[in-house]
Image (spheres, rainbow, N blue to C red):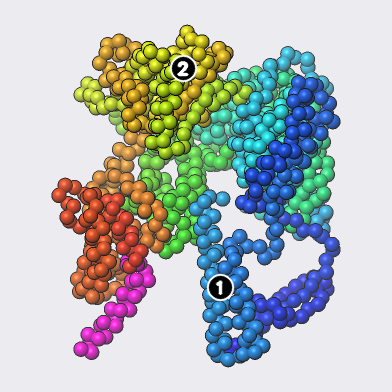
């Protein structure tokens, strides 16, 4: 379309000859508006009749518009007959057809309720998440004005009216997009076959992918019959196991073919918990996984960094399984994981898919042994193997035989067999979906139980190697296996490894396992500049030549263990992610600083710091590299200028310096080592004297200038023999040799009753005054009925021990039993935390209840610690105190009694709570000799965590004193005090926040800073003719007298101030560093928009005008 001044430019479109032949009905549609000054060209393309589908990753139901009340009500009403039937079938032995019917009935019940009460998404090519009703109105008005101009009135006035509507419409679109994206983030996350044939149709591509990625599982030559070995006991499924499996799953997980996601399942469980509990109990007790849960949708994803995407192997299939089936799979995975912790179900060298066994642990074990070998002037040679196909190549018959050898319960074996057989899947990509069909695979990708099943499958490889080659170490992570040995030179090691591979490949052939030669690597870790060239020839005649560096479990290892390549690659990857985040915020709009900090921590430091426990040794070059990355991120998070001091930005963002962060991470790892089981690969390599002392630790050879974990260097030549020992030494002052740590109890079985099931745990959400009023009324009733009542409390008091300031911890209980009242105090020493004291007090009350001689069935325990009750509700602690509490609660349950542990507000003059507080303080003061003698002498891990944080704070303080603080910022921040967490500062809009930060840093849009730039000739305010500093624009510029008066009155009326006698003085420090000052300054900045880019541009233009007037005068 042409306007009154310009004509349209014809846009060209290009197409292939094959597609051009299918285009028909080419015409101009004058009834449609394009949204620009061009006409709409309409045409049709004739294709085959294909029904396009939405991406399986997108939820089919619009959860945000669900009517959950009606959904729940319908489920309750329509599930009654099913519930009656399930109660009758709970203890019966059922056949597979009956159990399949039960699972399908549950699926259909939930699906029907969802269809009727949750609207489906209706995606189309024009669907936009940012669209809103206002845009619809603006678009209609724009189209209306366009039609008027084209058909009736082509005047300049009508054109201007149309152009105004168009500009308003497009600006509204831009705003809607930005607001939608910002809201989302702030609330947050044709191919050629392998044989050279080209695939054109969707079905051809599907067949190619299926052939390449769903290989037929291998057959084994030997007899796979399962031996008749005794089987382990298998406890009945509990309601809590079902609940945990459902509610610990993300509601955002993509649904399987049945379209029922976890968001719907979680709501359904709230309505029909008993129906779902009984369903899973029946299926798992009978060892059956229904056919309707064995279906999946295979989604094709590109593998990053592949050289040729015409090959099927350059893609990965992610199978989206039915979420109802995933609940059962997660229950079984949790149970097998527990069995692996308490038995020898898995080998000690197997990591991954197991609790407390990470990839970093496996690499740490390897590097520890490498460093020990180098210290002894020996060479360590390592051969890295990768199981080919891993999950896909598992033979079901062989897996079942291995499970039988391991004496796993028959229900587990039967369930596994039904889980793996007769699976079905349909691929979905390019907007099309394949019809579900049977596939032959080993273990399906994407299932919660897949990793542990694979670990069981290769479990006997490791004892096979150990029996023949006891000197060879074999750490592994899922399907990545490392074999290494130590010797005088690489040639000897290569011969040993070559012999080991014969055993490995023989076992692999017998057990239907293959290794991927293309991923097999060899490296020799030796002293000296000369590279070792010894090769290893595999039994299949493949020659593996040594390399200088390898990547194993995400960490690059070079033969000298400098980790230079690793740090550089991780820093580069983190920088790439940072560049993406740059698009989400700038100094005027975008994410809040808080959201930016979360992104930095979650997406950038998680990459840059990966494996720091292994490679961080205070290397200055690595510190500078990562500090540069952090400074760039800080400028983006805070909207600060490039020249802003990095140390000041770290304080403003509450982000620790790189060195402090990495040291803290290493200390946390050292503390984590104290929690590891004795058969853990890291625990086996720690000195036996390292707490908690163990007989299985490793006696590290300490000789010459090498130091033990609890020794510090007295001269430069002394050092710790390995990085692991060095990390352990980092907390040696916090846990000296011989220290008794709070012992960790054994892992809790998943079927065990939780604290919430053993006791009534309650925290009222009502107003504090109302809670107190109800409590006092309730207490009077309990006393009248002679119910036993306990009040518990913990206390922390500062004391002086051997001329050192230390905190003393005490626990107190006060109880009422009819007309009898009493109290008890406990001194907990100086190495506990207030939370430990609160929990200990509750445990003592439970001990009294266990021994109570009464016929009363209900006991009441009141505490003013919400955190203590929340900790019990989470039921994740494994210390000795929690174990004792559990034993007492279980005994109380056996006695037919019930304990109620309720929260009450503190310091509200509740008599029992005040008396418990007095008892706790008495224990903390430890004035009574009997109390001192009964003191607990162990150190709690929470206390050590606090000390680790304290050390980090001290390191940060030292760093702050020795670094560039910034000329202006140092006026406010004379010591390391993390900035006040002002609610107003968090809630400020992006532009106001960044302006405030720039003023505080002294680097912003004011001339006292900008004068250093060539474009600015002076630093004077063009109105006041004085230096334009932050103080000037906030407090004395003549142009803003009215706003400054409001600012001054607001701040001076408040009682806050930097110090005594300052309430009548207004200073920059008071405006920027006090709560009321921050609030008032933010309001001032938002109203005036001073010290912003647009404001400064206006200042410059106005100054030029004033300069012209002055010259004329």
Q: Badge 2 local density, few (<14 within 10 Å), some, or many (20+)?
A: few
Does 392 appear above or below 718? below
Residue that sits furthest to the top in the current view: 853
Magenta stretch bounds:
1089-1113
Q: Secondary structure at mark 2?
A: loop
Residue pictured at 67% horizontal, 65% vertical: 126
Q: Which quadrant is home to the N terminus?
A: bottom right
The quarter of the picture where residue 35 lies is bottom right
Front-lying residue, 1076 or 299: 1076
Say left or right for 614 vs 65: left
First along the sequence among labels 2 and 1 = 1
Q: Residue at x 20, y 89 (%)?
A: 1113
Task: List x then y, in percent, for residue 1021.
Answer: 24, 72
Verify CB contact (< 8 Å) between mark 2 and mark 1. no
On the rendered structure, is 2 left or right of 282? left
**Secondary element at tag 1:** helix
1094 drawn magenta: yes
Q: Position of residue 545 (x, y in %)?
A: 63, 39
Q: Nearer the viewer, residue 954 or 198?
A: 954
Does 851 appear in magenta? no
Name which residue lies at 65% across and 87% down.
150
Pick whichever, 204 or 845, lies toward us. 845
In the picture, the disc for residue 170 is: 1
Q: Main secondary structure of the magenta part?
A: helix
Location of mark 2 (residue): 785
Residue 924 in percent (x, y) is at: 30, 21
């Amino acid at each position: 379309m042409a306007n009154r001044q310009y004509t349209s430019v014809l846009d060209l479109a290009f197409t292939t000859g094959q597609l051009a032949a299918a285009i028909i009905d080419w015409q101009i549609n004058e009834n449609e508006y394009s949204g620009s000054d061009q006409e709409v060209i309409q045409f049709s393309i004739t294709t085959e009749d294909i029904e396009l589908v939405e991406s399986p990753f997108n939820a089919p139901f619009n959860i945000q518009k669900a009517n959950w009340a009606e959904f729940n009500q319908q489920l309750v009403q329509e599930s009654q007959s099913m519930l009656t039937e399930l109660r009758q079938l709970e203890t019966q032995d059922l056949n597979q057809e009956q159990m399949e019917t039960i699972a399908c009935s549950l699926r259909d019940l939930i699906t029907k309720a969802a269809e009727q009460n949750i609207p489906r998404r209706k995606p189309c090519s024009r669907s936009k998440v940012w669209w809103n009703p206002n845009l619809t109105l603006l678009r209609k008005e724009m189209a209306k004005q366009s039609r008027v101009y084209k058909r009736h009135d082509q005047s300049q006035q009508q054109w201007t009216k149309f152009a105004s509507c168009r500009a308003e419409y497009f600006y509204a679109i831009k705003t809607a997009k930005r607001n939608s994206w910002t809201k989302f983030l702030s609330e947050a996350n044709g191919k050629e076959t392998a044989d050279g044939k080209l695939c054109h149709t969707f079905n051809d591509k599907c067949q190619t992918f299926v052939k390449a990625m769903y290989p037929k599982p291998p057959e084994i030559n030997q007899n796979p019959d399962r031996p008749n070995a005794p089987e382990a006991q298998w406890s009945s499924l509990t309601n809590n196991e079902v609940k945990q499996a459902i509610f610990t799953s993300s509601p955002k997980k993509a649904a399987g073919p049945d379209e029922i996601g976890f968001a719907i399942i979680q709501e359904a469980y709230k309505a029909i918990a008993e129906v779902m509990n009984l369903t899973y109990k029946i299926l798992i007790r009978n060892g059956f996984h229904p056919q309707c849960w064995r279906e999946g949708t295979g989604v094709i994803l590109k593998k990053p960094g592949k050289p040729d995407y015409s090959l099927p192997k350059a893609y990965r299939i992610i199978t989206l399984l039915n979420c109802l089936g995933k609940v059962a799979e997660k229950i079984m995975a949790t149970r097998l994981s527990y069995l692996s912790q308490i038995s020898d179900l898995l080998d000690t060298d197997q990591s991954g898919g197991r609790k407390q066994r990470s990839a970093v642990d496996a690499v740490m074990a390897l590097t520890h042994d490498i460093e020990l070998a180098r210290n002894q002037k020996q060479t360590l040679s390592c051969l890295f193997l990768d199981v080919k196909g891993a999950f896909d190549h598992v033979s079901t018959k062989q897996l079942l035989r291995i499970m039988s050898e391991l004496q796993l319960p028959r229900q587990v074996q039967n369930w596994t067999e039904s889980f793996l057989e007769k699976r079905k899947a349909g691929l979905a990509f390019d907007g099309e979906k394949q019809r579900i069909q049977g596939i032959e695979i080993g273990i399906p990708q994407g299932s919660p139980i897949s990793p542990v099943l694979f670990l069981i499958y290769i479990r006997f490889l490791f004892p096979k190697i150990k029996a023949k080659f006891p000197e060879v170490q074999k750490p592994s992570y899922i399907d990545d296996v490392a074999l290494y040995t130590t010797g005088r030179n690489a040639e000897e090691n290569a011969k040993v490894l070559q012999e080991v591979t014969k055993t490995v490949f023989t076992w692999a052939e017998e057990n239907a396992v293959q290794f991927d030669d293309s991923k097999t690597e060899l490296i020799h870790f030796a002293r000296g500049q000369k590279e070792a060239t010894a090769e290893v020839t595999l039994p299949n005649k493949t020659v593996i030549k040594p390399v200088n560096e390898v990547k194993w479990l995400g960490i690059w290892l070079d033969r000298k263990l400098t980790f230079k390549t690793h740090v550089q690659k991780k820093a580069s990857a983190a920088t790439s992610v940072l560049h993406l985040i740059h698009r989400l915020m700038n100094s005027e709009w975008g994410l809040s600083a808080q959201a930016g900090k979360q992104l930095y921590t979650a997406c950038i430091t998680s990459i840059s710091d990966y494996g720091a426990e292994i490679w961080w040794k205070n290397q200055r070059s690595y510190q500078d590299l990562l500090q540069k990355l952090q400074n760039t991120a800080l400028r983006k998070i805070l909207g600060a200028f490039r020249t802003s001091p990095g140390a000041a930005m770290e304080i403003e963002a509450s982000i620790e310096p790189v060195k402090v962060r990495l040291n803290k991470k290493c200390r946390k790892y050292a503390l984590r080592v104290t929690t590891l089981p004795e058969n853990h690969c890291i625990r086996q390599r720690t000195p036996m004297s390292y707490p908690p002392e163990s007989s299985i630790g490793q006696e590290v050879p300490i000789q010459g200038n090498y130091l033990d974990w609890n020794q510090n260097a007295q001269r430069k030549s002394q050092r710790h023999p390995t990085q692991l020992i060095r990390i352990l030494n980092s907390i040696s002052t916090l846990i000296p040799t011989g220290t008794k740590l709070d012992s960790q109890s054994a892992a809790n079985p998943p079927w065990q009753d939780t604290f919430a099931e053993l006791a009534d745990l309650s925290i009222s959400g009502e107003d504090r005054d109302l809670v107190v009023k109800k409590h006092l009324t309730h207490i009077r009733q309990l006393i009248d009925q002679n119910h036993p009542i306990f009040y518990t409390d913990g206390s922390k008091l500062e004391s002086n021990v051997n001329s050192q300031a230390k905190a003393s911890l005490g626990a107190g209980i006060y109880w009422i039993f009819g007309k009898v009242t009493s109290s008890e105090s406990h001194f907990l020493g100086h190495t506990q935390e207030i939370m430990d004291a609160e929990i200990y007090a509750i445990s003592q009350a439970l001990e009294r209840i266990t021994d109570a001689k009464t016929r009363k069935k209900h006991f009441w325990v009141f505490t003013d610690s919400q955190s203590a009750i929340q900790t019990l509700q989470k039921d994740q602690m494994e210390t000795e105190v929690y174990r004792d509490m559990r034993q007492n609660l279980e005994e109380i349950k056996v006695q037919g009694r019930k304990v109620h542990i309720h929260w009450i507000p503190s310091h509200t003059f509740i008599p029992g709570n005040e008396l418990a507080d007095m008892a706790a303080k008495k224990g903390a003061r430890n004035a009574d000799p009997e109390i001192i003698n009964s003191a607990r002498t162990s150190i709690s891990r929470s206390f050590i965590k606090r000390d680790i944080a304290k050390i980090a704070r001290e390191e940060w303080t030292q760093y702050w004193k020795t670094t560039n603080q910034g000329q202006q910022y140092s006026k406010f921040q004379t010591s390391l005090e993390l900035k006040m967490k002002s609610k107003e500062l968090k809630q400020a809009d992006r532009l106001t926040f960044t302006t405030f930060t720039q003023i505080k840093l002294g680097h912003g849009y004011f001339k006292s800073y900008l004068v250093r730039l060539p474009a600015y000739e002076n630093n004077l305010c063009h109105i006041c003719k004085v230096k334009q500093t932050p103080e000037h624009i906030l407090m004395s510029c003549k142009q803003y007298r009215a706003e400054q008066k409001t600012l001054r009155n607001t701040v001076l009326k408040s009682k806050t101030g930097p110090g005594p006698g300052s309430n009548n003085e207004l200073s920059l420090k008071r405006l920027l560093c006090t709560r009321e000052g921050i609030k008032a300054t933010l309001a001032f900045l938002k109203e005036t928009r001073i010290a912003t880019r647009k404001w400064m541009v206006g200042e410059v233009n106005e100054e030029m005008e004033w300069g012209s007037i002055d010259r004329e005068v």
